[in-house]
Image (cartoon, rainbow, N blue to C red):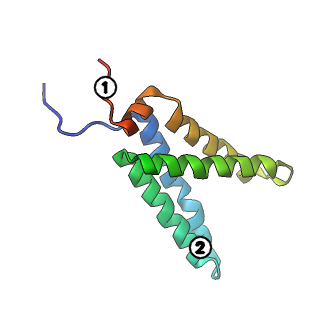
Amino acid sequence: MIEQSQRRVPMPVAVASVTLLVATVFPATAMFTSGPFMVTGLIQVLLLLALAYGLWRGSGRARFWTTVFSTVSAVYGVVMIAKADALGLLEIVVASVIVGLLLVPASSRRWFHDLPAEE
C-alpha cells in the first residue's frame, strides 16, 4: 500500500467547497453586469474563494465564517420569504445544505479539529 503524506478531504467538505465555488459565479456575473457594484462583487468573489480554499485546507476559521455567513443568509431568506423568488429559495436551500455539511457529519468535524480517522 502506498503511504499518503496528506489527508484526503472528506466528501462533505469537498461538496461544501465546490458549492461555494459555484456560488462565486453569481456575484461575479453581477460584478460584470452592473458598474457601481463592481467593488462589492469583487469583495464577495474574493471572500467566497478564500472561504472555499480555507475549507479545503481544514481551517477552523473558514468553517466558522462559512457557517456564520450561510446561517445569516438562510435566516435572511426565511425572513424575506414573502418576497422570495426561485433564486431566493435556492439560496436558502444551498445555505442550509452548506451548514449541514460542515456541522453534522463526523468526518467533517474530524477534518476541522484535526482528529485521527477512526479505523
Q: Amino acid at mark 1?
A: Ala
- Mark positioned earlier in the residue sequence (2 or 1): 2
Taking 58 as reference, is 111 above or below it?
A: above
Taking 36 as reference, is 115 above or below it?
A: above
Q: Quadrant of the C terminus?
A: top left
Badge 1 density bin: few <14, some 14–19, many ≥20, Cα 10 Å: few
Q: Residue furthest right?
A: 82
Left or right position of 37 against 8:
right
Left or right position of 57 against 96:
left
| Secondary structure beneath label 2 | helix
Q: Amino acid at mark 2?
A: Thr
Residue 52: x and y in percent read 44, 52
Q: Which residue is rendered at x = 65% and y = 82% of the image?
A: 36
Q: Quadrant of residue 8?
A: top left
Residue that carries the numbered disc 2 in the rendered image: 40
Residue that carries the numbered disc 1 in the rendered image: 117
| Secondary structure beneath label 1 | loop
Q: Which residue is rendered at x = 36% and y = 44% of the image?
A: 58
Taking 51 as reference, is 105 above or below it?
A: above
Q: Quadrant of residue 100?
A: top right
| Labels 2, 1: front one | 1
Residue 4: x and y in percent read 18, 35
Left or right position of 106 against 88:
left
Instruction: Give how far apart the Cα atoms at labels 2 and 1 are.
Output: 40 Å
